[in-house]
Image: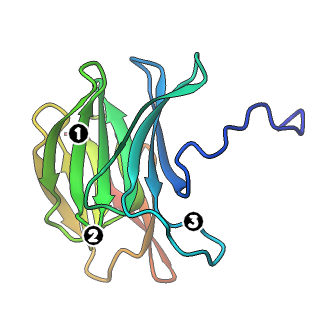
Amino acid sequence: PSTDRVIDNYRNLIPNQSIVTLVYEPERGFIFGGSSIARGGGSHPTETEAHFFAWDTERKEKVIDFPVTGNTAIVAMTAAKGLVFAVGRPSNTLFVYDVKAREMIHRVMIPYGGVHEISLGLWRDGLIYGLAGNAIFTIHPDNFALNRIGEYESGISCGFAMTETGIYFGSGVHLVRYVMLET
């Protein structure tokens, strides 16, 4: 921003799709991403499956790219312990990708309702937190166990910001904070 110019611009990494989720995975130095078949601007989708990909920041090239069968978007993503956790829509499936082995090692449907866009994050307690339907849930990065830890009956409609004290999200016109406590 201080130079008021674009440093690098990489176009059409996933042709005919929008890139909607990104996460940096420090062990390999890759930026992982997920796409959506939606192209924006009133256009109509020409593709049928979202893609999961990785960008090598040193070589400045895409090094991994494959479609995620049965999903039109990868709506949320985070990284922990050499793994990338991503959620596909409409299947509402959590995918766990092992960065070192370069393979998907786990898949499970999240049973708490549709996962909200950009709503996964690693907190200082080592757990991954997310929002789905009206639920706040965790994913244990060692065994991939899912656990609903809270519910907001008025509904979760958008947002996800995690601070030292909680998770913030939108519920209609309200901003809500779910308090995080050390265990």
Q: Residue at x 28, y 18 (%)?
A: 100
- Residue where numbered disc 1 is placed: 96
Q: Which callout, 3 or 2, points to the residue nearer the camera?
A: 3
- Residue where numbered disc 3 is placed: 39
The amino acid type of the residue labelled 1 equals Val
Q: CA distance from mark 3 to mark 1?
A: 26 Å
- Kind of element beneath mark 1: strand
The crowd level at tag 2 (other Cα within 10 Å; few <14, some 14-19, many 20+) is many
The crowd level at tag 1 (other Cα within 10 Å; few <14, some 14-19, many 20+) is many
The amino acid type of the residue labelled 2 equals Gly
Q: CA distance from mark 3 to mark 2?
A: 21 Å
Q: Residue at x 23, y 39 (%)?
A: 96
Image check: 161 left or right of 101? Answer: right
- Residue where numbered disc 2 is placed: 114
Q: Are marks 3 and 2 in contact (CB under 8 Å)?
A: no
The amino acid type of the residue labelled 3 equals Arg
Image check: 133 left or right of 148? Answer: right
Number of marks present in the image shown:
3
- Kind of element beneath mark 2: loop
Q: Is residue 113 above or below residue 10?
A: below
Q: Is residue 93 above or below residue 29?
A: below
Q: Is residue 124 above or below residue 48?
A: above
Query: In x, y percent, where is residue 54?
Result: 45, 32
